[in-house]
Amino acid sequence: MKTRIIQNEPGEEAVQATSESGKSLPAAVAEVARFTPTASYQRFAYVCGALLALSGLFHLVVYLVDGGPWGGPLSWRKPIVFGLSFGITLVTIAWLMPFLRARRLTGWIVVGLFAVASLAEVFLISMQTWRGVASHFNETTQFDSSVFSFMGMLVMLLAVLTVYVTVRSFFRMDAPPSLALAIRLGLLLMLVSQAVGAQMIAEGGNTFGAAGALKVPHAVTLHAVQVLPALAILLLVARSTERRRVKIVALGAVGYAVLIASTLVQTYDGRGPLDLSPLTSVLALVGIAILAVVGVVTLNGIRPGTR
């Protein structure tokens, strides 16, 4: 397979993936998505991201052996979820930096700080779990209070870095319009996630009202920066014009936004995740239906020769 720029319609450029070499779909996706690190800061971040993910998997094994509750302030769930989530997010930020035409020094500053803050955050969460104490909202002792305060400062640093990357993404990007749109919208939703996280700190916990779970919209919005670019990347190996790809990405973003809206309405109504109201049920179904249609259209467009 090779990737080339072709003219699909007057005035419209598109990235078209051809399957002349018979590469597998994963290989085709990796090529158009530029997954292979080209900068030293990317390689550093990928190693750190792998360590974070391995930490999450290690604690998953510990949980399976040790048992205990999955929920609650003291659970193996936290080092598992935070390790995997921070690892994936770090790798994503490092991956998209070249699309922003970031210079090597800028990449090292942004990605390096993001990596160090992520490693420190997951380390502190894991440390507190192994100590048998809560990692968040724990002011039982001076030490525990200091740990939680430092974790808050690390999160603030990550938020500032995310704002910088998001703002920079709205300048010229070295990416097809569909992928550029997906990255920009994903980063915007990541900022929404961080805003919800800030509210958790302000509320002093994960619950809003009677039973609203702030962590649900926090998690759903956080990983839009992986979901939407993944959609755009699959479209790049599909039989389609770039104009159509942009429309499909936009439709996918609408579906994802509707799904997010259902979690936000549910949470701020003070309802638990499974205590769906008629409105949130409709929103969730509409969001899922739109995403399902987008998924079917995308998969149907992938070339039979790219397998």
Image (spheres, rainbow, N blue to C red):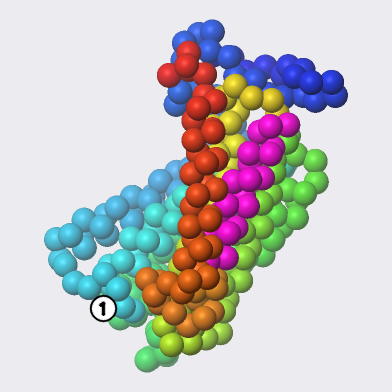
The correct choice, above or below, for 191 with respect to 229 in the image is below
Which quarter of the figure is the C terminus placed in? top left
The residue tagged with tag 1: helix, strand or loop? loop
Range of residues picked out in magenta = 243-263
Q: Main secondary structure of the magenta part?
A: helix
Camera sees residue 226 = no
Percent across and percent down for residue 226 are: 53, 47
Spot occupied by residue 143 in the image (x, y as percentages of width and height): 40, 85
Q: Which residue is mark 1?
A: 132
Q: Along the line of sight, which residue is nearer the eye, 131 or 238?
A: 238
Q: Is residue 254 magenta?
A: yes
Q: Viewed as shown, does residue 173 lie left or right of 122?
A: right
Q: Which residue in the rendered view is the most extreme toward the top?
A: 20
The image position of residue 82, as x and y in percent, is 41, 62
Query: Does the image show residue 4?
Result: yes
Is 127 one of the magenta-colored residues?
no
Foreground residue among 248 and 149: 248
